[in-house]
Image (cartoon, rainbow, N blue to C red):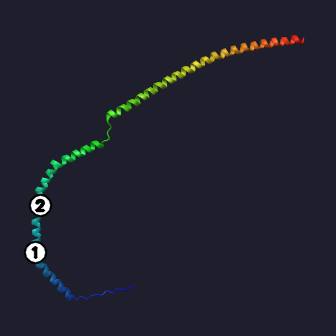
């Protein structure tokens, strides 16, 4: 690593005083030129403003009369294309179909319920009649069997005796 050595310059006070004096003299000589430059710049700025004001006014009228209507029409067209509001004619048919389906379903459910109740009542009546018929048939079969058994027992007892 190298160490850098800094040399300090010793400037005498007299030399600093001399430099300040020369700077003041140069300032006094440049001051009138700076004032003139400031005045010229102010006049040129004013001239530029005088020239630019009518040009800007003309440009604003041109934009207002020619460019703005085109931009406005373009934005209106884009808003129509982007708008998500539903079209009424497209929305009516699906709703009508949905409501018709719901009504048909409700009517079908009522008819099914009525048919189920009628079927249940019919089955109960048939069962009552069927039980009585079954009881009569069973009783008849039991009597027939008893008669057959009685005949067979008489035949067997007649052969044995």
User: How far across and down, in percent of the image, does residue 125 sit?
Assistant: 60, 17
Label pair 2/1, CB-CB below 8 angstroms: no
> In the rendering, which numbered label is found on residue 49?
2
SS of the residue under disc 2: helix
Q: Residue at x 10, y 65 (%)?
A: 44
Q: Residue at image x 11%, y 76%?
A: 31
- Lower position in the chain sequence, tag 2 or tag 1: 1
Residue at 78% over, 12% down: 148
Name the residue nearer the viewer: 46 or 155: 155
Q: Residues within 10 Å of mark 1 (few under 14, many from 20)?
A: few
Q: Nearer the viewer, residue 94 or 23?
A: 94
Q: Position of 127 compared to 1: left or right?
A: right
Q: Give coordinates of residue 18: x percent, y percent.
A: 17, 86
Question: Which of the labelled discs sits on residue 55, or is there none?
Answer: none
- Quadrant in which the N terminus is drawn: bottom left
Disc 2 from disc 1: Cα separation: 24 Å
Q: Quadrant of the C terminus?
A: top right
Residue drawn at x 47%, y 25% is 108
Q: Is residue 37 left or right of residue 158?
A: left
Would you say 12 lies left or right of 151 here? left
**Of 43 and 56, which appears nearest the observer?**
56
Residue 41 image point, x, y percent? 11, 68
Q: How many marks?
A: 2
Residue at the right extreme, as displayed: 161
Say above or below: 126 vs 82. Answer: above
Residue 147: percent from the left, percent from the top?
Answer: 78, 11
Mark 1, secondary structure of its residue: helix
The residue where tag 1 is placed is: 33
Q: Is residue 9 above or below residue 47?
A: below
């Amino acid at each position: 690593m190298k160490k850098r050595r800094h040399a300090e310059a010793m400037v005498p006070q007299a030399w600093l005083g001399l430099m300040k004096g020369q700077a003041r003299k140069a300032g006094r000589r440049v001051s009138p030129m700076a004032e003139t430059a400031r005045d010229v710049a102010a006049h040129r700025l004013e001239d530029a403003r005088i020239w630019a004001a009518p040009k800007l006014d003309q440009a604003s009228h041109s934009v207002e009369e020619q460019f703005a209507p085109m931009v406005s029409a373009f934005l209106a067209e884009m808003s129509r294309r982007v708008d998500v509001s539903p079209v009424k004619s497209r929305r009516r048919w699906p709703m009508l179909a949905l409501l018709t389906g719901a009504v048909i379903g409700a009517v079908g459910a009522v008819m099914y319920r009525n048919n189920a109740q009628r079927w249940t009542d019919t089955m109960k009546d048939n069962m009552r009649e069927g039980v009585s018929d079954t009881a009569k048939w069973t009783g008849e079969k039991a009597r027939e069997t008893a008669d057959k058994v009685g005949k067979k027992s008489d035949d067997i007892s007649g052969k044995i005796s």
